[in-house]
Image (spheres, grey):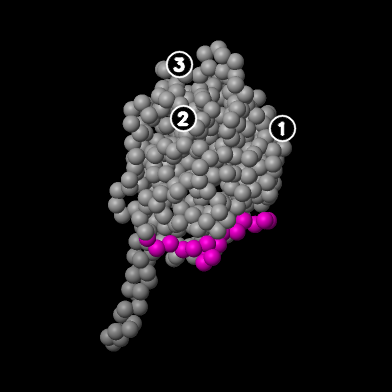
Amino acid sequence: MASSPSESTRPAEPSRLRRVVRVLVRVCAGLAGALLLLIVVVVAQGWRAFGKSADGARLERMEASPQYGEGIFVNPQVVLNYPDEMMRGLSRRSEHREPEAALPVVTPAPGSYDEPPSSGLRVTWLGHSTILVEIDGRRVLTDPVWSERPSPVPWAGPKRYFDPPLALDALPELDAVVISHDHYDHLDYPTIVELAAMVDERGWDTKFLVPLGVGAHLEYWGVPEARLIELDWWEVFALPGREGELGDGFTITCAPARHASGRHVFDKDATLWAGYALTGPEHRVFFSGDTGLFPAMATIGETLGPFDLTMIEVGAYDRAWPDWHLGPEQAVRAHQLVQGRALLPVHWGLWDLAYHGWTEPMERTLAAAEAVEAAVYSPRPGEAFEVDGQAPEPTRWWPEVPWVSGEDDPIEASGM
């Protein structure tokens, strides 16, 4: 008797299922292999950029810090993240996260820094949080990053919107380099290696000031221990005089911040994060580093202010991580809390690091500042300006593109 069609096809069904399973297994194995290869490549290429963990006397000093507990540094206030909101944020990303045309970058002319500023305070914003501050005869460079991408490897991560306005080897003699924390957009391995070699070759007496633990990275990359100054919150370093001269009373104070640290998946919060107060005989400048809003900002103003200029981060914010970054409106509030007279918004306009449009941080900062009559500088990248006590007139050098207001998408730090 002949088999029915249904009976003849039954043995083939498990056979097809087995073939599908085999294909899926091969695909998954291939993806796993590709992922493993990618991890190996990243680890191999980024090994030195990852930095080095603290040990010995450096670790003992970290463990004695009031900010240290259970193997990591801890914020006095919790730092919240909302993973579900982060996923939803992917659907509300701005269509204007990168410029569509070349930006009006200013290249400082040779000899621009030969003469000291007549006001005693001149500032050049080089992009993101890299700033050259000339203050009362001293020069301080903040968070130097000259690489194209804030990443341990040169082929991954967001690309710069513009090249560095000033070549690294065109920098004038520096008294100090201050680094706020060890995230890649603030601590750049290739830049530190080149800068350390240049400082030694030119015989400069440059000091590298870093929060606790970050010195291990720099020493691993070639910065001599004698140049390293590691500070805890509220600790003060007095810059020595040049060429054997007596010091002039210029100090750099490590200020608290509300943030985090880490250069790979196994070192979260292993080093401290901070801001800085630059205090000269005539002027004072505050650099926020990366931070969320926190109560001790008022203490910073009362203890170290008032400041002629605050350089405060305004970008890379989102409601999904409200305590990691200030956002524009809270940046203006922070400027008031630390008793600033004029504000330079930083940490914006160089990389796509969040969901908002690339011009939005400045648009919202100007709106918030206007509401409270706060003075704001908005220089083009590479453009130097002097802080002379006159009210600045903001220069709108960026294009007009759609952006979301603070009323429609507020950033509100927890616990405030």
2 or 1: tag closer to the N-terminus: 1
Name the residue at the left extreme: 2
Report the side of 373 relative to 357 (left or right). Answer: right
Residue located beneath label 1 in the image? 64
Toward the viewer: 265 or 7? 265
In front of the other: label 3 or label 1?
Answer: 3
Q: Residue furthest top?
A: 244
Q: Secondary structure at mark 2?
A: loop
Predominant secondary structure, magenta span: loop
Rounded to the nearest whole Å, what is the CA distance between mark 3 and mark 2?
Answer: 24 Å
Q: Position of residue 278 (x, y in %)?
A: 58, 33
**Residue of label 3:** 203
Q: Residue at x 65, y 25 (%)?
A: 57
Kind of residue at badge 1: Ala
Task: Return the residue at label 2.
Answer: 117
Q: Which corner quadrant of the image does residue 271 belong to? A: top right
What stretch of residues is rendered in magenta?
401-416
Look at label 3 and name its amino acid.
Answer: Gly
Mark 1 surroundings: few (<14), some (14-19) or many (≥20) residues within 10 A: few
User: Regarding mark 1 in the picture, which secondary structure is present there?
Assistant: loop
Q: Nearer the viewer, residue 321 or 367?
A: 367
Quadrant housing the C terminus = bottom right
The reply to whether residue 327 is in sight is no
Residue 360 found in image quarter: bottom left
CB-based contact (under 8 Å), mark 2 and mark 1:
no
Residue 303 in view (yes/no): yes
Rendered position, 260 above or below 168: below
Task: Report, in whole angstroms, how far the alpha carbon at label 3 lies from the one at label 1.
Answer: 34 Å
Name the residue type under label 2: Pro
